[in-house]
């Protein structure tokens, strides 16, 4: 069997490694001419880390990231609403790893080169069209200038090409991204460790919030901090489909004026960030189907969601693992793609909607609505049951609760790796 994977991001590369692990040949086609490391951060949750560990990558990822120990929610006044342990500190058998996307990509690419060979990744190949011919799929590609660069034929095609997926567009033409009128600023900056030194902090409320977490230790005792700031979109912001354009740093700093707390000066972080990027807050509506005979979708191509609860990248990894397990368990590849879809689609469509409603971060909005001027004690505003049930409900929906993650086997076991 030969599989075409469209998209060389986290979803595509991890899926390629999973297919190789079960003995299925594949090649990854990526639009950009060169995969350059991007320094912004991502959180790999224990459900994804256990699968990456089953690919033989867990120790390497842990060595270049931060093993997150705590998740803490604060109101806009810097008052603590809720805190909980994360990763092994919460009882998982695997850590939560906060890591630079660039470092994650480097680890995945190194494994691709070592296990599949240099020819397994073709850059500068944008999907221009696809068609299914009997028991084959044919994909046509163009270079970044739009010039045809050939075709590829395979037994299956996996669309792992992100929120602006060309594969998804083939089956859902005319579908538009859903934009909520808000913008994300983001950046990375060196700073002193804060709180536990391995804490992820979310501050603010639905329409004005910041997310900060360290993604790498630095030799001078400092850490590299990734931050994301969510606010009403200002005039002069990028068009809806624009992605990662350079922002006016002064605008980001001004919108978070006064966000300086004893435990961290958030506004100061923004002000010291050399390069600030901006992107519109978009996702897409849930769709009823991912698999179409010999073609399927994974990751953001299947379930693009707002960046709430640090789920998108982790769920993309899990998608590829479930897909590989389905192909291993089912002789008919078309049936396997349906099996994969049926295992994942309901939960991921639910996550899209939950993230629109703030998901795990809903406690921020509850505190803002009940005590906009702050509080003496959080128990005056939210009960312990409200705090605990909000957290647990989200984790169970995401397949991220301790019992689920620890209690099942990996979708494909480590001994299959090479």
Image (cartoon, helix red, strand yellow):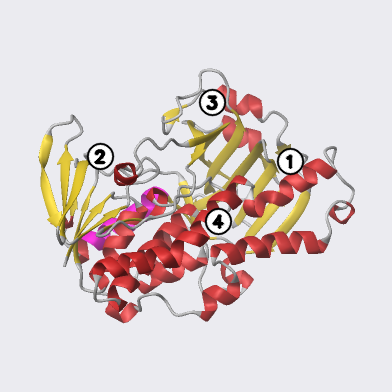
Please give the residue where the numbered disc 2 appears in the rendered image. 32
Q: Quadrant of residue 104?
A: bottom left
Please give the residue where the numbered disc 1 appears in the rendered image. 261
Q: Which residues are magenta?
A: 101-112
Circle 1 Cα neighbour tier, 10 Å, few/some/many (<14 / 14–19 / ≥20): few
Please give the residue where the numbered disc 4 appears in the rendered image. 350
| Residue drawn at the location 40% of the way across and 71% of the way down | 53
In the rendered structure, the answer to whether residue 284 lies left or right of residue 269 reads left
Q: Is residue 228 above or below residue 17?
A: above
Q: Are marks 2 and 3 in contact (CB under 8 Å)?
A: no
Instruction: Decide which of tag 1 and tag 4 comes sooner along the chain.
Output: 1
Q: What element does badge 4 sit on?
A: helix
Q: Residue furthest front?
A: 134
User: Which of the two residues, 274 or 50, is positioned nearer the viewer here?
Assistant: 50
Q: Is residue 277 above or below residue 34?
A: above
In the rendered structure, the answer to whether residue 215 lies left or right of residue 16 reads right
Residues under labels 2 and 3: Cα distance?
A: 27 Å
Q: Is residue 155 magenta?
A: no
Q: Position of residue 178 (x, y in %)?
A: 50, 37
Q: Are marks 4 and 3 in contact (CB under 8 Å)?
A: no
Please give the residue where the numbered disc 3 appears in the rendered image. 249
| Residue drawn at the location 27% of the way across and 59% of the way down | 293
Residues under labels 1 and 4: Cα distance?
A: 35 Å
Answer whether residue 123 is visible to the viewer in this image: no
């Amino acid at each position: 069997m030969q599989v075409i994977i469209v998209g060389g991001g986290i979803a595509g590369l991890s899926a390629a490694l999973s297919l190789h692990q079960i003995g299925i040949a594949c090649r990854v086609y990526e639009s950009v001419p060169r995969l350059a490391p991007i320094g912004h951060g991502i959180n790999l949750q224990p459900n994804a880390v256990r699968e990456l560990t089953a690919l033989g990558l867990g120790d390497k990822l842990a060595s270049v990231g931060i093993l997150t120990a705590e998740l803490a929610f604060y109101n806009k006044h810097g008052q603590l609403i809720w805190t909980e342990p994360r990763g092994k500190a919460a009882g998982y058998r695997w850590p939560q790893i906060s890591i630079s996307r660039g470092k994650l990509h480097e680890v995945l690419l190194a494994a691709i080169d070592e296990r599949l060979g240099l020819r397994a990744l073709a850059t500068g190949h944008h999907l221009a069209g696809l068609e299914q011919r009997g028991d084959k799929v044919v994909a046509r590609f163009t270079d970044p200038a739009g010039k045809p660069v050939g075709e590829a034929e395979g037994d299956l095609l996996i669309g792992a090409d992100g929120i602006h997926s060309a594969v998804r567009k083939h089956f859902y033409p005319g579908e538009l991204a859903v934009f909520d009128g808000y913008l994300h600023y983001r950046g990375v900056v060196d700073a002193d460790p804060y709180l536990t030194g391995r804490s992820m902090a979310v501050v603010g409320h639905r329409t004005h919030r910041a997310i900060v977490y360290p993604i790498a230790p630095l030799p001078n005792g400092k850490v590299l901090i990734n931050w994301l700031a969510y606010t009403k979109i200002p005039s002069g912001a990028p068009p809806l489909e624009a992605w990662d354009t350079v922002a006016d740093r002064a605008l980001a700093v001004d919108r978070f004026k006064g966000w300086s707390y004893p435990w961290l000066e958030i506004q100061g972080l923004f002000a010291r960030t050399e390069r600030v990027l901006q992107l519109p807050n978009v996702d897409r509506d849930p769709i009823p189907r991912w698999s179409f005979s010999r073609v399927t979708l994974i990751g953001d191509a299947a379930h693009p969601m707002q960046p709430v609860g640090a789920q998108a990248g982790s769920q993309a990894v899990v998608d590829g693992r479930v897909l590989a397990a389905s192909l291993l368990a089912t002789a008919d590849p078309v049936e396997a793609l349906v099996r994969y879809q049926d295992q994942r689609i309901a939960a991921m469509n639910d996550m899209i909607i939950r993230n629109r409603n703030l998901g795990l971060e809903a406690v921020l909005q509850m505190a803002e609505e009940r005590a906009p001027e702050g509080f003496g004690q959080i128990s005056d505003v939210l009960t312990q049951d409200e705090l605990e049930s909000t957290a647990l409900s989200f984790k169970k929906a995401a397949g991220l609760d301790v019992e689920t993650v620890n209690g099942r086997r990996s979708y494909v076991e480590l001994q299959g790796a090479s």
